[in-house]
Amino acid sequence: METGATATEAATHAVVQVVGGGTPQATGSFGFWFADQRWQWSDEVAVMHGYEPGTVTPTTELLLSHKHPDDRAQVAETIAKSLRNAEPFCSRHRIIDTAGQMRHVIVLGDTMTEDGKVIGTTGYYVDLTETIDEQRQDLLDGALPELFEARAVIEQAKGVLMRVYRLNAEQAFRVLQWRSQETNVKLRTLAARLMAELDSLPPAPPQVQTAFDHLLLTVHENTGPD
C-alpha cells in the first residue's frame, strides 16, 4: 500500500519548522480510507482539535462536529465528493476545539493507492491561526533576500493561492514558503513555475467568468478602499 507516509512526515516536519513557529500543533497528518470510512489522525491533529494524543478515535461524525457551523455543510460535501469520486480531501475551513477556541486550518490531501487503485486520501492539516512573529520575519528577511528581488512573481503566486484557497496574504505566503522548503526549490523559482503552469489548468466555468465580467465592469460603482 502506498500511503505517502514518508512524504507526509517530511511535510509535517517542514511545515512545523517553516510556518508553525515551533509549536507542535502547527501541523499534522491524517489518513482516510474510503471503503470503511476510517480516519486516522496524528497526535498533532488530535491536539489541534483539543484532545490529548491517543484519547480519541476520529470518525466522520466527530470531525464534522468540530467544524464551524458556517463551514460544516461545505466540509461534509467535500468529504462526500471524495468518497464519490475517489479524490483527495482538500479544504480550507474553521474548526472549534474542545475548549471552544476557533482555529483556521487548511487541509491539503493526496490520493492513497494500493496496487494502482485509489483506496483513500492522506495529507496534512496546517493551522493558520497564529501569525509569524516579528523575530521570525526578521530572520526570514535576512535569510531569503532573493524573495524581495522577485517580489512581483511571488505576489502573483500569493494572489492565486488567496483566490483558490480563500486565504489572506500571510497565509498564502506560508503555504508557498512551506512548499519551497519541503521541495528544496527556491521560493521565487517555485512561484515562477506555478505561474507558468496556470494555463494548463481547466478554464473557469462560464458562470464564474460571467460573474467576474460583471464585477470588473461595475466595481467602480462600489464604495471601498481607495
Image (cartoon, grey):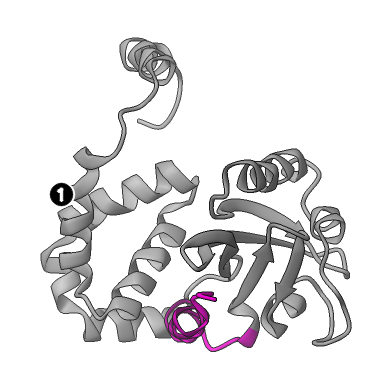
Instruction: Please indicate whether residue 50 sits to the left or right of residue 107 in the image.
Output: right
10 is within the stretch colored magenta: yes
Kind of residue sitting beneath label 1: Ala
Instruction: Please indicate whether residue 36 sits to the left or right of residue 19 in the image.
Output: right
Instruction: Please indicate whether residue 40 sits to the left or right of residue 224 in the image.
Output: right
Is residue 96 visible from the viewing direction of this image? yes
- Mark 1 residue element: helix
Q: Residue at x 13, y 63 (%)?
A: 150
Name which quarter of the figure residue 55 lies in. Answer: bottom right
User: In what quadrant of the picture does the N terminus appear?
Assistant: bottom right
Q: Where does the image place residue 143, in percent across and percent down from the top left?
A: 23, 86
Q: Residue furthest left?
A: 149
Of residue 166 and residue 89, the one placed in the foreground of this image is 89
Q: Where does the image place residue 147, in percent across and percent down from the top left?
A: 19, 70
Q: Where does the image place residue 199, in percent across and percent down from the top left?
A: 20, 38
The residue range painted magenta reads: 1-24
118 relative to 14, above or below? above
Q: Residues within 10 Å of mark 1 (few under 14, many from 20)?
A: few
Q: Residue at x 33, y 46 (%)?
A: 160
Instruction: Please indicate whether residue 84 sits to the left or right of residue 38 in the image.
Output: left
Of residue 183 and residue 127, the one placed in the foreground of this image is 183
